[in-house]
Amino acid sequence: MVVIIAGASRSGKSTVAKRLSSLTDFSIIPFDSILTTLDNLYPETGMGHFDNNIEFSPKLAEFTAEFIKHITYGEINGIIDVYQLFPVDYV
């Protein structure tokens, strides 16, 4: 099972993720770290931190869906903490 916690920067996503993790024993997956790594190593992917999240969110939604397929296949339970993803794009 994967839970996505998305929202504006500094809105308490990480705090909620940590609390939920302590109650469920799910792993926290901070997408900031994944996106920064992709941006630093593979800038040609266009995956990184952007000011224009309206344009970036659809691309991130596609990436997130594929990522979730792989971690659930491995039976990993996780909480994704992300601010660049808008619910309308993930649905």
Image: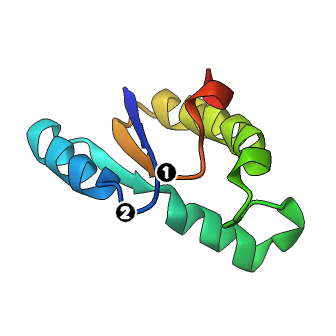
Q: Residue at x 62, y 39 (%)?
A: 64
Residue lying farthest to the left in this orientation:
23
Give residue 24's position: percent from left, percent from top. Answer: 15, 36
- Residue bearing mark 2: 10
In the image, residue 18 sits, relative to residue 74, either above or below, namely below
Give residue 43's position: percent from left, percent from top. Answer: 83, 72
Give residue 61's position: percent from left, percent from top. Answer: 67, 37
In the image, residue 42 sits, relative to residue 65, either above or below, namely below
Q: 10 Å neighbourhood of mark 2: few (<14), some, or many (≥20)?
A: few
Q: Nearer the viewer, residue 22 or 88?
A: 88
Q: Residue at x 55, y 34 (%)?
A: 68
- Residue bearing mark 1: 82
Residue lying farthest to the right in this orientation:
44
Secondary element type, mark 1: strand
Q: Answer with left or right where residue 39 lies relative to residue 4.
A: right
Distance from the alpha carbon under mark 2 to that under mark 1: 11 Å
Q: Residue at x 34, y 35 (%)?
A: 77
Secondary element type, mark 2: loop
C-beta proximity under 8 Å, tags 2 and 1: no
Q: Answer with left or right where residue 62 lies relative to residue 19.
A: right
Q: Which of 52 and 64 is in front in this view?
A: 52
Q: Image quarter for residue 59?
A: top right
Q: Marks 2 and 1: which is nearer the front?
A: 2
Q: Counting residues from the N terminus, which is met first, the one under dot 2 or under dot 1?
A: 2
Q: 10 Å neighbourhood of mark 1: few (<14), some, or many (≥20)?
A: many
Type of the residue with mark 1: Val
How was this image coloured? Answer: rainbow
Quadrant including the C terminus? top right
In the image, residue 42 sits, relative to residue 1, either above or below, namely below
Give residue 28's position: percent from left, percent from top. Answer: 33, 52
